Amino acid sequence: MKTLRAIGHLNTATFSALQMMLFTLIPFISEKTQLSMTSIVASFSVGSFLFLWSSPFWSSRSDSWGRMKVLCLGMAGLTVSTALLVLLLMVPELSDQSSLILWASRILYGLTAAGIVPVAQALQIDLNPKKSPMKAMLSNSMSLNIGRALGPLYLLIGGGQNMLPVLQGAVVWSMVLFLANVTLIGKSLQQTQKAETVSLASWFGTFSKMRAVFSLALLFTIFIGILNFSLAAILKKSFALTGADSSVLMAQVLLVSAILAVLTQGLGKVFFKNPWQGSFILGSLGLLGGSLLLGEMSSQGELWGAIAMLSLGIALIPPSYLSLMASGHKDTNLGRRTGLVGAANTLGYSLGGAFAAITFQINRFEVEHLLVAFVVVIGFNIAILYRGRGDQNEVLYAQV
């Protein structure tokens, strides 16, 4: 049990670390392969957008195939897709095929790696049937944030002129983790749910039971998408920085935010057995305070205050709505439900980027005002969840 729990966390952390590393390395890949930034960003975007379909698909398959089999497939896809990027950087003679290899890498990533995080979430809940889903989701979110911190740290420590060996090392680690996944297939919890014919009606039935959670996940990730796509511009404007300086400050902000989120979630495991104990409210107040302060800040002290408040919301709200998702109809289609939340996350990030781009384009109001508006809508969604919590007769939050 402990080994399976640890391997689930390692899969989650490795996925997020590699994701952060690759996004950071986009300019390096462009420089070494002579591919345009436009082509690289487009391929990365398409790969990520494929999660909208593949995340629910693989998560649903894990209900009948078993969690570890799908984690093996996801880690294999992550390893091979990253290895293709390493091949591009190692063999410049492939320049004629470089665009094809790049797109093959990102499409393979989008079709296979999408199952890693939601299936790891389902695995953690499987392994803790008598405990509050809140604690399992806080632990899994901690793994995501640890990966988000370790990815940039790994690059900073081993990077500089050694970016290729750093990426090679990441591929070797993901391959080792894939082999570890394979050895645990026989030891994973047996799935009792039989494979069923996938139909739109069955998906809609699952969706209808968790539409409020899906809505909150969508709104939250739209907020995060807006924040991620606009924060560097906000920093540049607020402190009159150059583009390079704003990028450096942005990297520092992401690192500090990830660390603060991990610390917050560690405390959350102690104080919150379920989201009704205040994690939703505290998280929403953190998002609101941080967004308001971003719009008014004039010093770096105020910036770090805003980041601390935003990190509070980022740390607490996702585990809260994931615990609600996991609690209703606890033993039925858990993988499918985690996949639907993963699809909401993918769609939310995409819409968030679009909202940020449109806001910058029309230039009628500040993007910070848009962030505040979405926090208010998130607050209304949470109020609806509070109002309907008495109807959730199957929620077993009292168990610890």
Image: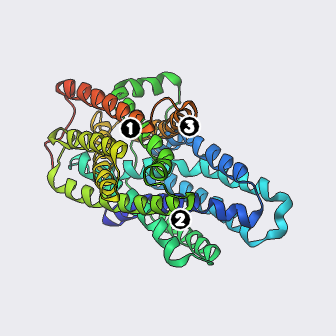
Residue 186: % across, % down: 44, 60
The image's colouring method is: rainbow
The answer for how far apart the CA atoms under marks 3 and 1 are is 18 Å
Residue type of the residue flagged with mark 2? Phe
Q: Position of residue 20 (x, y in %)?
A: 51, 59
Marks 3,2: beta carbons within 8 A = no
Give amino acid for label 1: Phe
x 49%, y 37%: residue? 352
The quarter in which the N terminus is drawn is bottom left
The answer to whether any part of residue 143 appears in the image is no
Please state if 387 lies on the left or on the right of 373 as rendered: left
Vertical position of residue 50 compared to residue 309: above or below:
above
| Residue 399 percent across, percent down from the top left | 15, 46
- Alpha-carbon span between mark 1 and mark 2: 31 Å
Residue position marked by numbered label 3 in the rendering: 357
- Residue furthest top as drawn: 201
Residue 328 is situated, as x and y percent measured from the top left of the image, at: 28, 33
Mark 3 to mark 2: distance in Å?
38 Å
Residue at the image position 37 percent from the left and 32 percent from the top: 374
Identify residue type, mark 3.
Ala
Using the rendered image of the protein, determine whether residue 78 is visible from the camera's viewpoint.
Answer: yes
Given residues 43 and 313, the one toward you in this image is 313
Q: Residue at x 53, y 39 (%)?
A: 353
Above or below: residue 158 compared with residue 11: below
Q: Where does label 1 land, which residue? A: 220
Which mark is drawn over residue 178?
2
Q: Secondary structure at mark 1?
A: helix
Query: Label 2 neighbourhood size at 10 Å, few (<14), some (14-19), many (20+)?
Result: many
Which numbered disc, 3 or 1, marks the residue that appears first in the sequence? Answer: 1
Q: Describe the element under mark 3 as helix, strand or loop.
A: helix
